Image: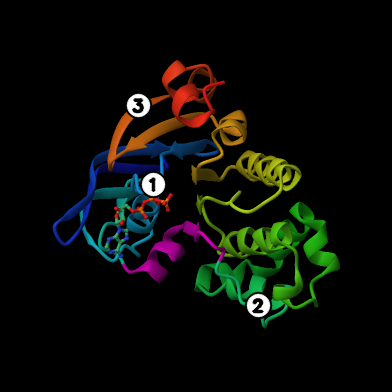
Amino acid sequence: MMLDIRNLAAAYGMHRALAGVSITVAKGEIVVILGANGAGKSTLLRAVAGMCEGQVQGDVYLDSTPITGVAPDLIVEQGIAFVPEGRGIFGEMTVAENLALGAYSKHARARQAENLARVYELFPKLRERRSQMARTMSGGEQQMVAIGRAMMADPKILMLDEPSLGLSPLLCKELFQNLAKISKTGLGVLLVEQNAKQSLAIADRGYLLENGEITGQDDAKALLTNPAVQAAYLGGA
Ligand code: ATP
């Protein structure tokens, strides 16, 4: 397994946000975590990225190397890139400048030209708009900038926190298709989503997170037809 999360727990003071969470992501695999508001989805990704403000316990391995307790910038350097909720791009900088910021590790700088070509191939619009201020890009385009910037870190694993939030149905579709393309280049993708239908459609596997615990896991196709998943996440369809 490329990413191996074992028995992860997190707490904010007395509030337990995660307990006993174990999740794996293989090379080229898309794994989706489904959970209601407050289930602990963001906490999970932030804990893996070394950015959780709470107390974290448990183990995270990337290609068998433990990364628990490692500083966030070193985790990026080891190969995990994180696109946070709300994207976190710099509005007063151009698209190209935002992308360049993603290549800050020594390893990523050495591969900057190659990765930029890859990002522009994936998102031709970013090449067209490379001199445009990021804040003037549409929501969907800003999401491309955020994903492109994460790709500039030359990651093995890409983690995304609700990337479809605020996007129109058409842009959601495009976003998920792009994630499928990215995974085909050999990256592992771990994403947290409320859009169960479209994310499961492109995912290989999924986990259900409820009140900080994994309450189910299965192949994405099986989850799409699972009655409990349909009731909770697919509008009872
Ligand atoms: P949402 O979909 O609404 O973003 P989520 O599944 O991502 O929710 P988290 O943001 O991980 O959930 O929050 C899990 C629990 O931990 C919630 O009860 C939340 O209030 C609490 N929590 C999150 N961040 C903090 C923090 N920095 N300090 C204290 N409590 C926090």
Coordinates of residue 234 in the picture (x, y in percent): 54, 28
Q: Is mark 3 within 8 Å of ligand 1?
A: no
Q: Is mark 1 within 8 Å of ligand 1?
A: no
Coordinates of residue 202 in the picture (x, y in percent): 61, 32
Determine the CA span between mark 3 and mark 2.
39 Å
Q: Amino acid at mark 1?
A: Asp
In the shown orientation, is residue 141 left or right of residue 213?
Answer: right
Residue placed under numbered mark 3 in the picture: 216
In the shown orientation, is residue 42 left or right of residue 126?
Answer: left
Relative height, residue 216 to residue 20 (above, below)? above
Specify which label sits upstream in the sequence, 3 or 2: 2
Task: Specify the label residue 178 is tagged with.
Answer: none
Q: Amino acid at mark 3?
A: Gly
Specify which label sits upstream in the sequence, 2 or 1: 1
Determine the CA span between mark 3 and mark 1.
25 Å
Task: Residue 58: tell me if it is visible.
Answer: no
Quarter-of-image position of residue 208 = top left
Residue placed under numbered mark 2 in the picture: 91
The residue shown at (59%, 31%) is 197
Residue placed under numbered mark 1 in the picture: 63
Specify which label sits upstream in the sequence, 3 or 1: 1
Which quarter shows the C terminus? top right
Q: Magenta span covers which residues?
A: 71-87
| Image region (quadrant) for ligand 1 | bottom left
